[in-house]
Image: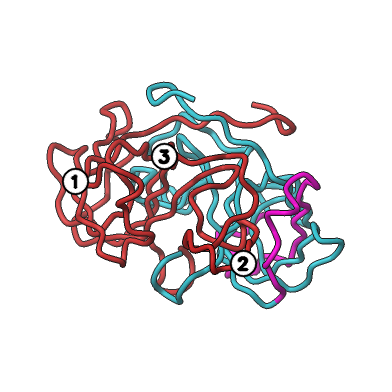
Chain colours: A red, B cyan
């Protein structure tokens, strides 16, 4: 790893979802996204110890179908919205296309399969981190 | 990029802060962290168009001094706390050590220097993404 060139990120698991295409995915989880499974790789399962159903979490994903050379977009894909810098939007197209998804754990099976509430990431999206929500409104 | 091996993440800039050592950094921005500058690389400056002082943002960083082979920690570094999976904690030591920092933009200078409120990341930490906060409590 090198400060001037970059860093290597490894998937800890993947999303399994009925959402199969980016074009059909809602833009935010609160806009009608389905519940989905996170399949965590067995070698990372120990990192889940202490996570419980009912808990609110932030999932970080790598939005693998994104364009990474885009710096300006029409917000929400609507050409009526003026071109805006990607860092002022939640566009999935951006230099480092990391998705942030605040959700809740509904069920845990076999220690490494997590059912989560309303997730807008499509099937096969790599999961790169899971973090607890510490306080409402303050830290996620 | 490859689903089974990993993804390359490129710094869009760096943190400039009076916090020089990880051991002295507060664990959360709300615990007395200083204001800090984000120095965005000129080639990414267009991506900031539309960001304004006063706006709340989420900064994603790569916590470059972290240990990436750690799956269990004593929360908050206190050995009285039982060993817990890193994904149930905000430990900086984790497989993909991405920091999430919710903060506010205080000032923008030269289009690519952003002064932000209370940031617990140390000087030199790579910045990998900036996202707007969409709604209080719901999406960050």
In the image, residue A79 sits, relative to residue A59, either above or below, namely below
For marks 2 and 3, give the CA distance: 32 Å
Q: For the residue labelled by badge 2, is the local secondary structure a helix, a strand or a loop?
A: loop
In the image, residue A110 sits, relative to residue A133, either above or below, namely above
Disc number placed over residue A82 in the picture, else none? 2
Q: Nearer the viewer, mark 2 or mark 1?
A: 2
Where residue A72 sits: x, y (%)? 63, 54
Q: Name the residue under label 3.
A: A128
Of callouts 2 and 3, which one flags the residue occurring earlier in the amino acid sequence? 2
- Name the subunit of mark 1: A
Where residue B24 sits: x, y (%)? 68, 53
Q: For the residue labelled by badge 3, is the local secondary structure a helix, a strand or a loop?
A: strand
Of callouts 2 and 1, which one flags the residue occurring earlier in the amino acid sequence? 1
Residues packed near mark 1 inside 10 Å, few (<14), some (14 to 19) or many (20 plus): some
Q: Residue at x 70, y 51 (%)?
A: B122
Query: What is the quadrant of residue A37 in the picture?
Result: top left
Q: Residue at x 63, y 38 (%)?
A: B64
Q: Name the residue under label 1.
A: A18
Where residue A99 sits: x, y (%)? 44, 50
Residue range (magenta): B25-53
Q: Say which of B37 and B51 sits in front.
A: B51
């Amino acid at each position: 790893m090198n400060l001037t060139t970059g860093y290597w990120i490894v998937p800890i698991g993947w999303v399994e979802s009925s959402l199969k295409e980016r074009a059909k995915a809602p833009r935010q989880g609160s806009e009608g996204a389905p519940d989905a499974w996170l399949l965590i790789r067995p070698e990372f399962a120990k990192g889940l110890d202490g996570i419980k159903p009912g808990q609110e979490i932030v999932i970080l994903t790598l939005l693998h179908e994104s364009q990474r050379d885009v710096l300006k977009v029409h917000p929400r894909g609507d050409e009526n919205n003026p071109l805006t810098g990607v860092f002022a939007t939640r566009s999935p197209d951006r230099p480092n296309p990391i998705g942030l998804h605040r959700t809740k754990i509904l069920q845990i099976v076999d220690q490494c399969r997590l059912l989560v509430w309303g997730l807008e990431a499509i099937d096969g999206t790599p999961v790169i981190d899971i973090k607890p929500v510490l306080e409402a409104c303050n830290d996620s």
